[in-house]
Image (tube, coloured by chain):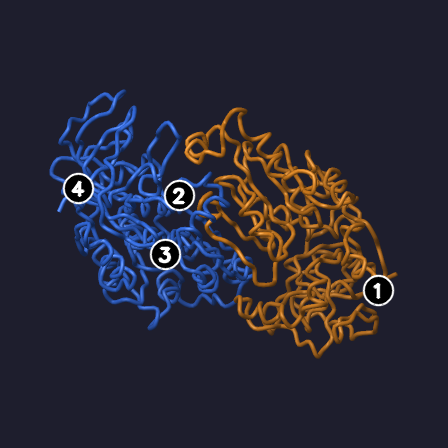
Chain colours: A blue, B orange
């Protein structure tokens, strides 16, 4: 079966062995699969990702880099055949989404970050039947394939426990930031402030539901927050006043959606007093912070990862019901031959949010 | 009036001008004043503290280092005389505590970190009448002087929103850690795990209410947490299991009470999945973290500072009513001549927690 394969730090198109569904598993055909920022990082820094993953408690590495890896964990697929110990309740031909996790005899595996469980950059996958979610009739495959990245945004918003009085500030409007904006919009929070240096991305942010988009070169998003959240005449420069008047101020909730070193410190410096900071961007490198900034403002930092099974299913339902419009995020489609080129385009991401791979092309 | 004065990065005993109470202010005599870790830091790194304070939004610096500064913000005092625009409801001779804040014509000042508002290292202070709290009859001056540092611990516990199922882990048993233990004990949380390399400090931690004290050279405090918090047989090494079984695990709440670079990263590495980390230690220097550790475990970091006026008053009341026994923390007393020596002793803090200054001696 054909796939875009990660081999010797390159993406090459080659034929790989057909995956075989084990007990409880189902063989599916990839219909569409998104390219994630983590995949870009993986191609360049695989050794480092594996090493830090092991140190950071992800368990023993599931990737042997001397062997082929087929990435891709944001997919919509079609059922081809069932392995043993399956119920077959969803028939062949049914379109499905799934969390990118597989259970097998060798334990839990990450689909797309594993030698054993190829991802959606290839024509065929195996998935666990118990995790399959049927794509509702009428929902396009492309939109369904956005379930995984959107679930990340919904999860971040859930963990932030955002309420009506909060004023969210989304830093970075790549796919992660756009997903967070979708999650905030779904919660009915308003206004949503979003910041990005790229005009294209700011336009996408608006289409996804951001109410105020800011180019940080022109104006600080925290300045915007202050205009909205702080009653006129209140002197925030006086820490005593700021503390005593806390009830009159709409709390700031800052979403870090960039994931590069230095961003967290930038937020510690810019965020308003008592802000909650939700770190959604995945910074793989060591970072430098000055804790005193966070201390003086009593900031709260919530680091988040992925989503729960319920959030994943809810996300698919919300997309199907039109509560979330993911179309602005889909900026390109390629076959397996186009994956390496798509990675290059995404490295300078001004024009794209999500490029979908259609390996069957 | 006599005081231990910070002058040219040294502590010297000298006579300083008597402070004069302004409108709404009261002149008081210092009865006892504790030495805080921040004071130690101030003596060595004043320029840096002022610079970072200004950058970190504390407002314009209130300290001119070319002029004398009398430190001391953990005091119990006796009312001597009232300035204009005071009610005089508390008579001269009344013992009082106060948050170390003063309001004057030049704005809000920090008592003990200001050229205008000398602290308790000297014989006389001015305080704002509206912040005075009468020391309840029968409560010793020494114990009352511990109100300020204990309020820091109670505030940290409040911000952590600690509940019955939580298992707290206190990292560092200096004055801050001991105050946090007192706050946890007051909340009825059990068991309280406390870690320190010093046997003396571990003994103090036990006396303050820690149920399990750990020497990190022998056993990790997180290992202790796991023995208590995780049902036998549950494999935390498997992230999927750890996530799915979250309800069966008693949450870990880690209190960082050391405040030196590297400590936060150490906690990110050691803390259990989904732990709340409360940063009470005040690290003034830049620090290095690896965000991926916090991301993979979805940690929450709450940075805290000081206390609210209500928490300060509650702390004094709890000490007076015997809910908190602060005696184990009082390990020495000196007059103004002894302050420089006390700073040296506290620099290698194995034998001491809190040394009280009695400037009237």
Question: Pointer 1 and pointer 3: residues touching (CB < 8 Å)?
Answer: no
B335 with respect to B237 (left or right): right
Residue B315 seen by the camera: no
B102 with respect to B6 (left or right): left
Residue sitting at x 53%, y 66% = B56
Residue closer to the observer: B347 or A186: B347
Q: Quadrant of the N terminus of chain A?
A: top left
What is the chain letter for disc 2?
A
Q: Which residue is mark 2?
A: A64
Q: Quadrant of residue A290?
A: bottom right
Question: What separation in Å lies between label 4 and label 2 (alpha carbons)?
Answer: 27 Å
Same subunit: marks 2 and 1: no
B239 with respect to B39 (left or right): left
The mark lying in front, picked from 1 and 4, is 4
Circle 2 SS class: loop
Q: Which residue is mark 4?
A: A31
Residue A65 seen by the camera: yes
* Position in image of residue A113 (x %, y %): 35, 43
What is the chain letter for disc 3?
A
For marks 4 and 2, the one nearer the N-term is 4
Circle 3 SS class: helix
Residue sitting at x 63%, y 32% = B191
The mark lying in front, picked from 2 and 3, is 2
Question: What separation in Å lies between label 2 and label 1 (alpha carbons)?
Answer: 67 Å
């Amino acid at each position: 079966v054909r796939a875009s394969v990660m081999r010797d730090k390159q993406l090459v198109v080659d034929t790989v062995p057909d995956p075989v569904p084990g007990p409880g598993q189902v063989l599916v055909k990839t219909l569409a699969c998104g390219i994630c920022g983590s995949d870009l990082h993986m191609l360049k820094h695989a050794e480092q990702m594996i090493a830090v993953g092991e140190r950071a408690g992800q368990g023993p590495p599931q990737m042997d880099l001397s062997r082929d890896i087929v990435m891709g964990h944001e997919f919509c697929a079609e059922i081809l055949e069932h392995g043993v110990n399956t119920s077959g309740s969803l028939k062949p031909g049914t379109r499905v989404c799934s969390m990118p996790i597989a259970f097998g005899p060798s334990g839990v595996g990450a689909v797309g970050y594993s030698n054993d469980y190829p991802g959606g950059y290839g024509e065929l996958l195996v998935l666990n039947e118990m995790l399959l979610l049927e794509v509702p009739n009428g929902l396009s495959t492309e939109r369904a394939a956005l379930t995984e990245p959107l679930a990340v945004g919904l999860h971040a918003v859930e963990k932030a426990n955002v309420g009506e009085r909060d004023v969210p500030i989304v830093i970075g409007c790549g796919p992660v930031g756009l997903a967070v904006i979708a999650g905030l919009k779904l919660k009915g929070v308003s206004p949503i402030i979003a910041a990005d240096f790229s005009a294209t991305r700011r336009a996408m942010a608006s289409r996804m539901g951001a109410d105020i988009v800011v180019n940080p070169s022109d104006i600080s998003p925290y300045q915007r927050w202050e205009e909205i959240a702080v009653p006129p005449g209140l002197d925030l420069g006086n820490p005593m006043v700021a503390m005593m008047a806390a009830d009159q101020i709409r709390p700031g909730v800052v979403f870090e959606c960039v994931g590069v070193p230095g961003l967290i410190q930038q937020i510690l410096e810019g965020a308003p007093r008592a802000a909650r900071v939700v770190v959604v961007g995945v910074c793989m490198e060591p970072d430098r912070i000055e804790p005193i900034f966070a201390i003086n403002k009593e900031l709260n930092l919530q680091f988040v990862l992925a989503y729960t099974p319920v959030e994943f299913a809810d996300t698919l339902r919300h997309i199907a019901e039109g509560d979330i419009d993911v179309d602005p995020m889909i900026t390109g489609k390629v076959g397996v031959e186009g994956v390496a080129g798509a990675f290059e385009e995404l490295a300078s991401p001004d024009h794209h949010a999500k490029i979908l791979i259609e390996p069957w092309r």
